[in-house]
Image: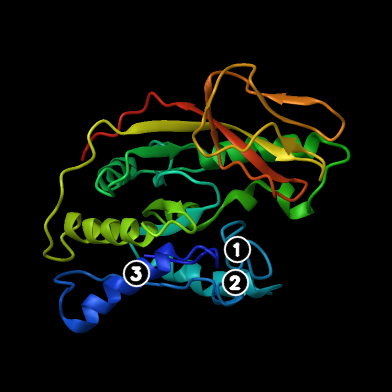
Amino acid sequence: MLGAVHGNEVAGTQAIGRVIADLDSGALRIARGTVTFVPVTNPLAHARGTRVGDRNLNRNLRPTAVPQDFEDRIANRLCPLMAEHDGLLDLHSFNSPGEAFALIGPPDNAGDLEPFAHAAQEARVVRHLGVRRIVEGWLSTYERGVARRRERSARAGTALDTDASYGVGTTETMRSCGGWAITLECGQHADPRGPGVGEQAIRQVLALLKLADLPLQPPVADPEVLRLEEVTDRLHEGDCFAREWTSFDPLRAGELIGQRQDGTEVTAPADGRIVFPNQRAEPGHEWFYFARPSPRRLDGA
């Protein structure tokens, strides 16, 4: 259970803190198995109240023999820790208003990008987190975005951002170690309900996996499953949205989303939804994602 992978996302830190307090007081007991709680995963960013310390911990997460920054040093401790576990719940929050949602990995596959064999377990867990909206397709979409960055002769951003492995964060690392992993976005950063969303999710995971003797609530019925299909980068400081967008606002094919510095219009490629819109994105980084309904069914709850 991770909190504050991004230092200014404190809902997870507070949620984990509440659960730890109950463990310390004896109000809650881990009856079987082992659970590791990390309320502050990135202490430098958390102390500063910023998303990152030296760089984004949730990108390019892998051990390195010669650490170059603070996040490299965290990765050298965090990656082996995750490898000792069967699953991961990573608690986050987001900038724009909106309801909580979760991100899951791909269906079971033997491909090169993100081979996986625990899709049924992720589906079972995610339906008990208490959120009705679930998103898939992160790493494959990110990889396609990286390919487009390479094609741009005058791209912005750093060389690291043109490496598909830069899309690898906590959940992708956990899956590469043979486990399952879910990101729970607990709501907007300042939403006072966020810590409660995270705490409820933690308790339901403990109940579902029989790690603690807690009542298990029924799974969310008929969740909305969306698949990320495209990521659009902000190329210049002058790139701006046509209006203030919120994650999961609906889009109609051809609808104006924003405008480039040179006046070029950016429009929706089809009917769908906008996800993670970020007007303050640095040039060369993700501006927004485009998602459509997924045909995937999350059975096995």
Q: Which residue is mark 2?
A: 45
Label 2, secondary structure: give it.
helix
Q: Residues within 10 Å of mark 2 (few under 14, many from 20)?
A: many
Position of residue 270 in the picture relative to residue 171 (left or right): right
Label 3 or label 1, whichever comes before in sequence order: 3
Q: Are marks 1 and 2 in contact (CB under 8 Å)?
A: yes
Q: Is residue 252 above or below residue 70?
A: above
Label 3, secondary structure: give it.
helix
Position of residue 114 in the picture relative to residue 267 (left or right): left
Residue 271 coordinates in the image, percent (x, y): 53, 19
Q: Residues within 10 Å of mark 3 (few under 14, many from 20)?
A: many
C-alpha distance separating marks 1 and 2:
6 Å
Residue 106, quarter of the rendered image: top left
Q: Amino acid at mark 1?
A: Arg
Q: Is residue 255 above or below residue 160?
A: above
Tell me which residue sits at (30%, 41%) in the image: 123
Q: Are marks 2 and 3 in contact (CB under 8 Å)?
A: no
Q: Amino acid at mark 2?
A: Ala
Position of residue 265 in the picture relative to residue 290 (left or right): right
Q: Which residue is mark 1?
A: 51
Q: Quadrant of the C terminus?
A: top left
Tell me which residue sits at (40%, 52%) in the image: 184
Q: Amino acid at mark 3?
A: Ile
Q: Nearer the viewer, residue 75 or 6?
A: 6
Q: Which residue is mark 3?
A: 16
C-alpha distance separating marks 3 and 1:
19 Å
Residue 279 coordinates in the image, percent (x, y): 68, 45
